[in-house]
Image (tube, rainbow, N blue to C red):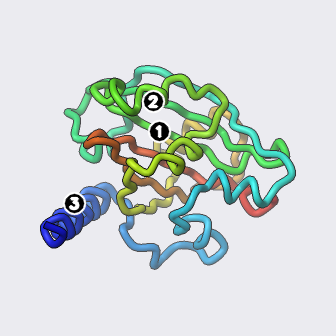
Amino acid sequence: MRELRHNADFLHSELHAVLHSRQGWLAQPHSLPRSLRFWLSDRGSLTQRLKSRCDSFRVAPLATGLARPNADEYALLGVPPGTRAYVREVLLLCNEVPVVFAHSVLPHASLRGGWNGITRLGSRSLGEALFNDHRIQRQPLAYHRVRRNHPLFRAIAGQQALAVSSLWARRSVFCLNGHPLLVTEVFLPAIDAP
């Protein structure tokens, strides 16, 4: 039984790697910039890591509610293109400086059951909820250099002026009872400031 589960986990991670690569996301952290490599590849709680690096940490909600996911997110969530989902976008601030833009997408069908508390997080960290529940399984990370034409870059540029033409991001799917939640974290230029 253990071998069957191991094989199923392996196939699931391979499927995610294929889906990410088709959309320009890297399954391996080979070509990540050295200055961001540890931030991007660390599989632990980003919230906890940020809190350990600054005097004050805060989550600033930007947008929440039903919306259409970005085009490169549908396949990972297993929903047809055009389907609406619960989308939450926040800034993570260290010492009142934005260091990460976080974008999470939860299929509408997953709003019932274990994920239903996601809609009531407000200014609380999603990361703390994800890493405190042993039932939640995280799929492999994928990485992408988000450029000006990507919807995530445009969402950040709508909140603050950016003097760069691209930003590095990572994303992964968290599963609870077979229901996926996609979390993408885009690292802002001030990430090394804390």
Above or below, 58 relative to 41: above
Identified at 61% across, 65% down, the residue is 39
Residue count near mark 3 (Cα–Cα under 10 Å), binned few <14, some 14–19, many ≥20: few
Disc on the earlier residue, 2 or 3: 3
Disc on the earlier residue, 2 or 1: 2
Residue 191 point in image, percent of width and height: 72, 58
Residue 45 point in image, percent of width and height: 58, 56
Q: Which amino acid does label 1 sit on?
A: Ser
State the SS at label 2.
strand
- Location of residue 59 by image quarter: top right
Residue 95 point in image, percent of width and height: 84, 47
What residue sits right under mark 2 in the picture?
Answer: 87
Q: Are marks 3 and 1 in contact (CB under 8 Å)?
A: no
Residue count near mark 2 (Cα–Cα under 10 Å), binned few <14, some 14–19, many ≥20: many
State the SS at label 3.
helix
* Quarter occupied by the N terminus: bottom left
Is residue 64 shown left or right of residue 122? left
- Location of residue 106 by image quarter: top left
What residue sits right under mark 1 in the picture?
Answer: 104
Q: What residue type is labelled 3?
A: His
Q: Do the residues labelled 2 and 1 touch (CB within 8 Å)?
A: yes
Towards the viewer: 137 or 64: 137
Q: What residue type is labelled 2?
A: Val
Residue 31 point in image, percent of width and height: 48, 76
Q: Residue furthest front?
A: 1
- Location of residue 101 by image quarter: top right
